[in-house]
Amino acid sequence: MRSNKFLKAEQAPLIWDVPGLLAGVDEAGRGPLAGPVVAAAVILDDRSPIKGLADSKQLTALRREKLYDEIRAKALCCSVAQASVEEIDQLNILQATMLAMRRAVMGLRLKPAKVLVDGNRLPTLDVLAEAIVSGDALVPSISAASILAKVTRDRLLCELHLQHPEYGFDQHKGYGTAQHMQALRVHGALAVHRRSFAPVARALVVPAANEGGEP
């Protein structure tokens, strides 16, 4: 459990605080073997606080869905953007994530005076920005962004499941579970699989290597 001293430190104003609107940015989907990486940017309204904001990974799916609707209804503005599987394979996952974050910030209806980004890397932006490690658990606007990104991506993977139920996307959301790896070996890769990711490449080589071998 964190000490009171640490909690007080979290509430202290940041050194580089500037007057104006503050946007939080986070992503979902860096680790999976399939599907786009999704980023969101959110500017919250201090006059309409949202209770229960937290790192999306610490919330149940039902709670995320409820908060998603509340964020959409109460935030001053928000924006969700993607980087495609093709962009991930061409640029690498880090650069594709930065691209999705940049697109999310650029999509905001209101321009923030400062952007707070979860993690330790910053996308290229034309506004003041700061990276905050574990920001999705510390900064409400980043928490809100993590929820929007996570729910949006999960919905995309559930839609993909309806098209290709044999892969189980509704269960693993594209992550490299045993179920997913077995489906890759049996059915091969779809257009939504990230071929630059080693587990996908290895799974695709196995059938070819076994051709003409024992059943």
Image (spheres, rainbow, N blue to C red):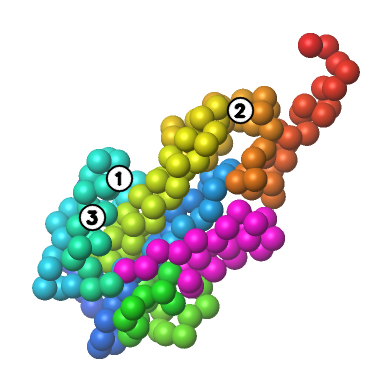
Magenta-drawn segment: 78-103
Magenta-highlighted stretch: main secondary structure?
helix
- Relative vertical location of residue 83 with respect to residue 176 in this rendering, above or below: below
Q: Which residue is mark 1?
A: 58
The first of marks 3 and 1 along the sequence is 1
Residue 102, given in percent of the width and then of the height, sits at 48, 72
Q: Nearer the viewer, mark 3 or mark 1?
A: 3
Left or right, 24 with reference to 192:
left
- Mark 3: which secondary structure? helix
Give yes or no for residue 86 being in the magenta stretch. yes
- Front residue of 87 and 113: 87
- Mark 2: which secondary structure? helix
Q: Amino acid at mark 3?
A: Asp
The first of marks 2 and 3 along the sequence is 3
Camera sees residue 136:
no
Give yes or no for residue 124 being in the magenta stretch. no
The first of marks 1 and 2 along the sequence is 1
Q: Which residue is mark 2?
A: 183
Residue 50, given in percent of the width and then of the height, sits at 16, 60
Residue found 46% across the figure and 57% down from its top: 38
- Relative vertical location of residue 19 with respect to residue 86 in this rendering, above or below: below
Circles 2 and 3 in contact, beta carbons < 8 Å: no
Count residues near mark 1 (Cα–Cα under 10 Å), then give few for <14, some for 14-19, many for 20+: few
Q: Which residue is mark 3?
A: 69
Q: Amino acid at mark 1?
A: Gln
Q: Residue furthest right?
A: 212
Residue 108, given in percent of the width and then of the height, sits at 36, 75
